[in-house]
């Protein structure tokens, strides 16, 4: 089971007068303190989730749309002399003449003709559809001879591209609905992105629209992503709203009804195209009607002529005037073929407002409403979608990397012995946006602990300025977000500090490490503002504020020296990543636990390692993955991102076991398998060397006291729970409740014999296995649903002092369990569980 940092910031205390047992309890509880998510954080989670799930398909839609934007120009470039011929002095043929020539040559009735007023432009003829066809074939003909022009090279490619863009190559109706859902996703990304980057000074246009190319690293990516997104925002809103019109019939029908357009006629079930046509109808002479049209429509540039099937039927003209505001601003006219009498005339300017607004939808979507500049803007915005996908993924992976670094520092801090002396602890606090400040604060606290200084680590996100009076010394690592602003979570603290009256902090010594980027005008702005306000409230400086431009080693060295002076002991350089030390283990077993599962294959992996290797339940195995051929997946060990898995066994079992879900994805890399999971579950041969490091996980430490335990998980999360239950069994602790979820009982009852054995021998007092796919529709049940239904038993177990351990997927299961606990206990009750170390999570 791959793990990542929990949702909660640490509040880890190692005070001078704390007994080791009490300190361990607080450390275990502190590993999962509750984060109060703001609306901005909720929208941020939705923004990145939609981006990494729908983003790839949106790139395909964007690139195909950009390809179609200049389809006509590209076709003319590829087919010179086909749609435009040299101008001749003789008059072009009339629609009636052209239809007669084409009907005789092809043996098909011409249903309509598109005529162009431009000299030399080839008319386009549409034949009546044959049985089983949605539409008939079309050809271009020579305007002066009526000869059929060569077929357009590349036309099939653009038809395929249009099908990809509109239906994703799916059948028409489901394809339209999927495309509509993706349009809604893009709309959500655009609007949530606007909300997320809303600046403190929204009237300053430079904040919105200017990009600084001198930025580096994450700042460069974020600025590019945000500014380019702002430039494209209006275009994306227009593209998505207009695209939804064609995607959903209910939307289109209601808009058309409001506009007064006649309802579309659905094809009767079982019919294969239109009825068989009468070819003799092509002999109707439309010459008088064409002459009358030219007299009544001066200045026409394009005319679509629908030919009648009977002599008494009117010829229908749909035409575009030279002064039309856009390409769909077309007038209509019906003329009798016999005498040229106009029976209906509807100039575009006299059509209803609703109809005219509906006709704007297509030009807005294509950008043609604003002429050539509009088409260029829509094309560039469509081509921008890959940019947002790439920068979004890079920002996401950067955050994940930073979180892994913070997790490692938190684990090392939890395992560092505290000071046994007396006195108030030193506050080490951080204000972090991307995780860098948190990691540096944790590393600094660990260094101080090693030097014998008692520390109290706090995030300013949930800190109250009044609590500063409890300390004599505070060291604060503060990031700056945007143009000198506090990180999102720290805004509350900054407001409260600003509103604090008088000088209540007299006697507090403060040292500040300010993180920033010199390319921003307000470099380290929040760090400076924070220090100034603290000094205004009476705090005195331990040392001058230290500014860090990105990862400047000289500034970090100055911070390390300042910590050394504060502790009176030597301090190793802060901010220097330790070289990972990995042992060689060997693959000795691999068993597929769920053949035929709807989910990915789940394998039990058994590894043999160095003699004397030891760990406790809840620990992690950090593995360097390999490619299918055994080579390093991302380069050498120093630069290779390891994967962490919960260990599913104990040292006394004689081997290290993991439960690994085989990840699959599109693409040829590693034959479509995840790097680590593919290596462990498929490609590594028996006996293969596995580079592995054991990692303590104090946030998920085993509960070996004589108290009840509730174990909740899903999927590969059973790994950590199994190790806990084995440890409890060896300790003779039997008051255990396991609530576990998977897909189908028939194929996903993993570790069934072991779990049933524990239930039979009394080691498990209660076993709830929930299989979500065995139910249908509303009858489907998930882990959180079973826990909610068992609220009475949950409350009774907790009243007996039960510890809750949750292991598995963060989104869905873990979040659902957290919600149920709040429903049953209330917010104060959940906070009390956390404070007592009775709510422990290992979620990913």
Image (cartoon, helix red, strand yellow):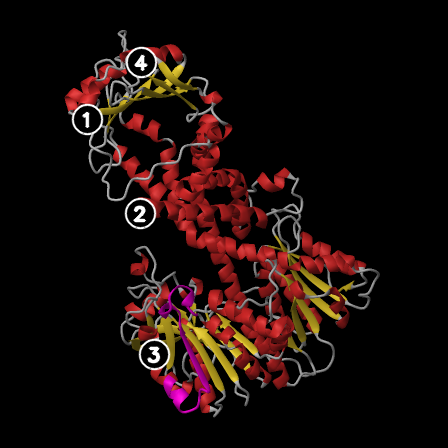
Mark 3: give few (<14), some (14-19) or many (20+) Cα within 10 Å: many
Marks 3/2: CA–CA distance: 43 Å
**Front residue of 843 and 577:** 843
Instruction: Look at 27% across and 13% down and name the residue there.
Output: 94
Can residue 677 be seen at all in this image of the molecule? Answer: yes
Q: Quadrant of residue 771?
A: bottom left
- From the viewer's perspective, is 589 left or right of 493? left
- Which badge, 1 or 4, is on the more N-terminal residue? 1
Region in magenta: 756-781
N-term mark: 3 or 2: 2
Q: Label for residue 170? A: 2
Quadrant of res 718: bottom left
Residue that label 1 marks: 278
SS assignment at label 2: loop
Separation of disc 1 and disc 4 at Cα? 22 Å
User: Which quadrant does the N terminus fall into?
Assistant: bottom left
Q: Nearer the viewer, mark 4 or mark 3?
A: 4
Residues 217 and 18: in front is 18
Residue 766 lies within the magenta run: yes
Vertical placement of residue 339 versus 841, above or below: above
Q: Could you classify mark 1 by the number of other residues whose Cα lies within 10 Å: few (under 14), some (14-19), or many (20 or more)?
A: few
Image coords of residue 335 (percent x, y):
34, 16
- The residue wearing badge 4 is 290
Which label lies toward us, 3 or 1?
Answer: 1
Q: Residues within 10 Å of mark 4 (few under 14, many from 20)?
A: many
Q: Nearer the viewer, residue 212 or 374?
A: 374
The answer to whether the residues at label 3 and label 1 have Cβ atoms under 8 Å apart is no
């Amino acid at each position: 089971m791959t793990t990542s940092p929990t949702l909660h910031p640490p509040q880890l205390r190692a005070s001078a007068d704390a007994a080791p047992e009490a300190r361990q309890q607080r450390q275990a509880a502190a590993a999962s303190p509750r984060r109060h998510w703001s609306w901005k954080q909720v929208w941020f989670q939705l923004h990145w989730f939609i981006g990494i799930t729908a983003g790839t398909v949106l790139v395909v839609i964007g690139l195909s749309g950009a390809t179609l934007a200049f389809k006509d120009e590209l076709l003319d470039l590829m087919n010179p002399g086909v749609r435009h011929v040299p101008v001749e002095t003789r008059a072009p043929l009339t629609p009636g003449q052209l239809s007669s020539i084409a009907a005789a040559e092809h043996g098909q009735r011409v249903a309509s003709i598109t005529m162009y007023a431009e000299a030399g432009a080839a008319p386009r003829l549409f034949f009546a559809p044959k049985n089983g066809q949605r539409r008939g074939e079309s050809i271009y003909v020579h305007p002066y001879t009526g000869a059929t022009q060569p077929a357009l090279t590349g036309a099939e490619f653009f038809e395929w591209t249009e099908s990809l863009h509109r239906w994703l190559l799916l059948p028409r109706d489901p394809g339209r609905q999927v495309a509509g859902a993706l349009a809604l996703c893009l709309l959500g990304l655009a609007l949530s992105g606007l909300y997320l980057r809303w600046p403190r000074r929204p009237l300053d246009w430079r904040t919105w629209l200017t990009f600084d190319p001198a930025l580096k690293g994450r700042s460069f990516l974020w600025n590019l992503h945000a500014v380019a997104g702002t430039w494209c925002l209006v275009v994306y809103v227009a593209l998505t709203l207009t695209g939804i019109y064609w995607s959903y019939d209910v939307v289109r029908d209601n808009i058309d009804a409001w506009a007064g357009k006649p309802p579309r006629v659905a094809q009767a079930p079982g019919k294969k195209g239109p009825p068989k046509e009468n070819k003799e109808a092509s002999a109707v002479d439309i010459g008088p009607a064409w002459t009358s049209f030219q007299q009544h429509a001066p200045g026409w540039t394009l005319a679509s002529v629908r030919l009648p099937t009977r002599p008494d039927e009117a010829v229908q003209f749909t035409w575009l005037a030279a002064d039309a505001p856009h390409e769909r601003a077309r007038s209509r006219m019906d003329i009798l073929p016999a005498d040229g009498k106009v029976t209906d005339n509807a100039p575009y300017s006299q059509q209803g407002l609703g109809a005219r607004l509906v006709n704007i939808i297509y030009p807005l979507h294509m950008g043609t409403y604003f002429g050539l500049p509009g088409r260029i803007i829509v094309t560039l915005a469509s081509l921008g979608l890959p940019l947002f996908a790439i920068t979004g993924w890079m920002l996401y992976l950067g955050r994940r990397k930073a979180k892994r670094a913070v997790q490692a520092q938190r684990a090392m801090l939890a395992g560092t012995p505290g000071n046994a002396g007396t006195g108030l602890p030193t506050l080490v606090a951080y204000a972090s946006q991307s995780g860098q400040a948190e990691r540096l604060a944790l590393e600094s606290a660990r260094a101080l602990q090693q030097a014998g200084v008692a520390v109290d680590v706090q995030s300013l996100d949930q800190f109250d300025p009044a609590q500063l009076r409890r300390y004599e010394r505070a060291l604060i690592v503060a990031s700056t977000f945007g143009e000198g602003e506090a990180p999102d979570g720290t805004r509350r603290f900054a407001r409260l500090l600003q509103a604090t009256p008088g000088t209540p902090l007299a006697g507090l010594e403060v040292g500040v490490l300010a993180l920033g980027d010199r390319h921003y005008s307000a470099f380290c702005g929040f760090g400076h503002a924070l220090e100034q306000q603290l000094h205004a409230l009476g705090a005195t400086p331990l040392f001058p504020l230290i500014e860090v431009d990105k990862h400047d080693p000289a500034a970090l060295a100055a911070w390390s020296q300042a910590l050394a002076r504060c502790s009176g002991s030597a301090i190793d350089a802060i901010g220097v990543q330790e070289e990972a030390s990995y042992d060689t283990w060997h693959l000795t077993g691999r068993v597929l636990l769920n053949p035929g599962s709807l989910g990915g294959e789940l394998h039990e992996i058994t590894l043999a390692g160095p003699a004397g290797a030891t760990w406790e339940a809840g620990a992690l195995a950090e593995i360097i993955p390999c490619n299918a051929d055994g080579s390093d997946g991302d380069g050498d060990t120093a630069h290779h991102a390891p994967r962490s898995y919960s260990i599913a066994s104990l040292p006394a079992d004689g081997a290290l076991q993991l439960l690994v879900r085989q990840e699959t994805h599109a693409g040829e890399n590693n034959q479509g398998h995840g790097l680590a999971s593919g290596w462990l579950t498929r490609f590594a041969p028996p006996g293969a060397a596995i580079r592995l490091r054991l990692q303590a996980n104090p946030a998920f430490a085993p509960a070996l006291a004589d108290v009840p335990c509730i174990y909740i998980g899903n999927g590969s999360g059973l790994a950590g729970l199994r190790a806990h239950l084995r440890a409890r069994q060896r300790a003779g602790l039997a008051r255990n409740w396991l609530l576990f979820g998977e897909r189908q009982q028939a194929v996903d009852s993993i570790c069934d014999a072991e779990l049933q054995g524990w239930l039979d021998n009394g080691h498990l007092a209660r076993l709830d296995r929930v299989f979500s796919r065995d139910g249908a529709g509303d009858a489907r049940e998930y882990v959180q649903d079973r826990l909610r239904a068992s609220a009475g038993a949950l409350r009774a177990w907790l009243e007996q002092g039960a510890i809750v351990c949750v292991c598995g997927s963060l989104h869905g299961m873990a979040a659902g369990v957290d919600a149920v606990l709040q429903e049953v206990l209330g917010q104060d009750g959940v906070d009390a569980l956390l404070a007592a170390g009775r709510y422990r999570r290992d979620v990913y």
